Amino acid sequence: MSVPSQTSLPSLRVILFSNLAAEAATMLRGLLANMGQRVPLVVTTPGPSRRPNVAYRDYSAALPRGQDVLVTSHISLLPAILAPLEPDLIFVAGFPWLLPAALLALPRLGCINAHPALLPRYRGPDPLFWAFANGETETGLTIHRMDASFDTGPILAQRTIPIAPEDDVDTIFPKLTATGAELLPEALAKVAAGEPGIPQPSEGASYARLTRDDDRRLDWGRPATELRNRVRACASRGALAEVDGNRLIVRRARVVDAVPSAAPGTVLDEAPLIVQTGDGALLLEDAVPAEEVDG
């Protein structure tokens, strides 16, 4: 990933908070370093009990030798722990905890967050899942100042990212990281200059709640286009389906012609596997028995 030239940026002491996958998180840390930013500490977490995450293990192991890492779920203790580091800025990307007021007030230049959506739309923990599930044709990346609520602070930088028909949650990530490389220098320059950002409008705000297993299930009574979007929203994690009493994990599908007289859930063909839906039919291009994934 190329780093935009930003020679006018001051060198800030930036504490990075992230629970992204190892590749994305280490790339982000490297991007900050290549821009001349000092990262005295990386903070990551196993996450809240309702949102457990083991990505911190690979992430911590992948960071450069000599990079200090704090793994914690005791967020209320962080203001006292981090105060001696005298950070200029806290930068958050994919971190599941709400930062307390004392932590938001700690850095000289405040706290900023990178959110994979076009705020104020799709605030919350699962913006990409719901963008794909809802059949959106674009998403985006927003870097904003942080306040007392999730994803509601003033916007510093924002870019739209088209969602191609064959994109899914996995394939959109490289586009997000490339966009992040473009946006971060812009956001840091505004932070260093003391710009407050643009308040988010109240119109058009929406919330992307945490997904549950039921959100991954394919209901054959729904239209095929809707079900394919749900598969795209799950991507490599897989949507959950039941076909002729067999539980399947579906990672890729496409819409095909249906048989008008067939009931939803009817298997129209075994190879490839095609299932009738409430409107159209769905060809399951990548589907495996759930027990193979369950272990």
Image (cartoon, rainbow, N blue to C red):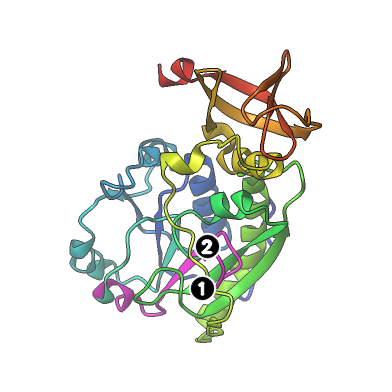
Q: Residues within 10 Å of mark 1 (few under 14, many from 20)?
A: many
- Tell me where residue 244 sits by quadrant: top right
The span from disc 1 to disc 2 (Cα, nearest Å) is 8 Å
Residue 279 in the image, given as x and y percentages of width and height: 72, 40
| Residue at x 37% of width, y 45% of height | 66
> Is 182 situated above or below 272?
below
Q: Is residue 236 magenta?
A: no
For this rendering, which residue is in front, 137 or 14?
A: 137
Q: Nearest the camera: 223 or 117? A: 223
Give coordinates of residue 141: x percent, y percent: 61, 63
Q: Is residue 96 left or right of residue 186?
A: left
| Range of magenta residues | 102-122
Q: Residue 54 falls in which quadrant of the image?
A: top left
* 13 vs 249: above or below: below
Label drawn at residue 144: 1
Which residue is farthest top? 271
Q: Judge whether residue 258 can be spotted in this image.
A: yes
Which callout, 1 or 2, points at the residue further toward the start of the chain? 2
Q: How far from the left and from the top, in percent, is residue 227?
A: 63, 40
Q: How many marks?
A: 2
Question: Which residue is at 42% across, 52% downward?
Answer: 210
